[in-house]
Image (spheres, rainbow, N blue to C red):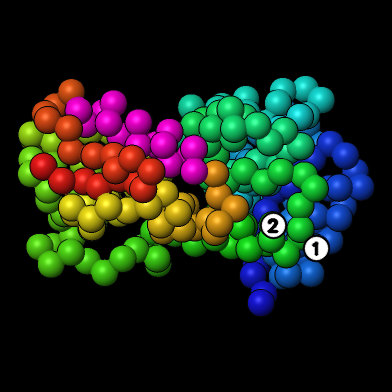
Amino acid sequence: MSDDRRVLVVEDEANIRDLIETALRFHGFQTVAARTGAEALRAVRPPAGDRRPDLILLDVLLPDIDGFEVCRRLRAAGDDTPVIFLTARDTPSDTVTGLTLGGDDYVTKPFSIDALVARIRAVLRRAAPAATAPPPAEDGQVLRVADLELDEAHWTVRRAGVEVELSPTEFRLLAYLMRNPGRVLTRAQLLENVWGWGRDGNPQVVETYISYLRRKLDPLGPPLIHTRRGVGYALRP
């Protein structure tokens, strides 16, 4: 399947970088490469008239600043270009660190090129909410559970009348919980429907983002997100 979107490949090892670029071009993507974190930051903000990347494949271990710091700087500057981390480091703490900093996915080396392409396409689909959004809620794309209100059309959340700032991933997770009020959703269901991951997804990511939501919502009223131990989570009054 052809895809003309542009992927920035940030990798300091030339053989891996060339392999990824060749494979992505075979699958119809356009590519641009960077060897260091500094080059990556410049490539994300090209001169006027040049095309920005639609997604960044970002190695964590780079010779100058690491990939985590590159992602942190991008998000701090308000840049929401999707990021997939590439790394040989596969500890749960590293995975959660990358996703917490604003990464969209985390792929460990060695990896299958076909699996990598599938993850790229899944992240690009999630990054286009207008094209992939669920059917509008009957009440005008506004979801309500108790005193919690989520406006899918304007990407805003309020609890007890107070606006709550959420990251894009937090927003998608809360929206999915609110579209299934009272239903216990397994971690696998959340990984598949919010992150677009299959069975190889890390369930700790779900736990981490549930804790982020609780930290922002619980100070404004009684807890709404409930844990069914060993199963998953449900949102209900």
- Residue stretch in magenta: 203-218
Name, please, the residue furthest toward the front: 230
User: Looking at the figure, which quarter contains the N terminus?
Assistant: bottom right
Q: Residue at x 73, y 38 (%)?
A: 87
Name, please, the residue furthest toward the right: 15
Question: Measured from the top left, where is residue 95 in percent x and y?
Answer: 59, 35
User: Looking at the figure, which quarter contains the C terminus?
Assistant: top left
Q: Which of 154 and 114 is in front in this view?
A: 114
Q: Do the residues labelled 2 and 1 touch (CB within 8 Å)?
A: yes
Q: Which of 155 and 107 is in front in this view?
A: 107
Q: Which residue is drawn at 67% across and 75% down?
A: 2
What mark, if any, has residue 23 been given in the picture? 1
The secondary element bearing badge 2 is classed as helix
Q: Is 205 within the magenta?
A: yes
Q: Disc 2 versus disc 1: distance between alpha carbons?
A: 10 Å
**Which quadrant of the figure has residue 142?**
bottom left
Q: Would residue 171 be visible to someone looking at this image?
A: no
Q: Residue at x 71, y 43 (%)?
A: 108
The secondary element bearing badge 1 is classed as helix
Question: Measured from the top left, where is residue 34 in percent x and y?
Answer: 78, 40
Residue type highlighted by circle 2: Leu
Q: Would residue 76 be visible to someone looking at this image?
A: yes
237 vs 30: above or below: above
Residue type highlighted by circle 1: Ala
Q: Name the residue under label 2.
A: 116
Q: Is 156 within the magenta?
A: no
Question: Measured from the top left, where is residue 73 in percent x and y?
Answer: 56, 27
Mark 1, other Cα within 10 Å: few <14 / some 14–19 / many ≥20: some
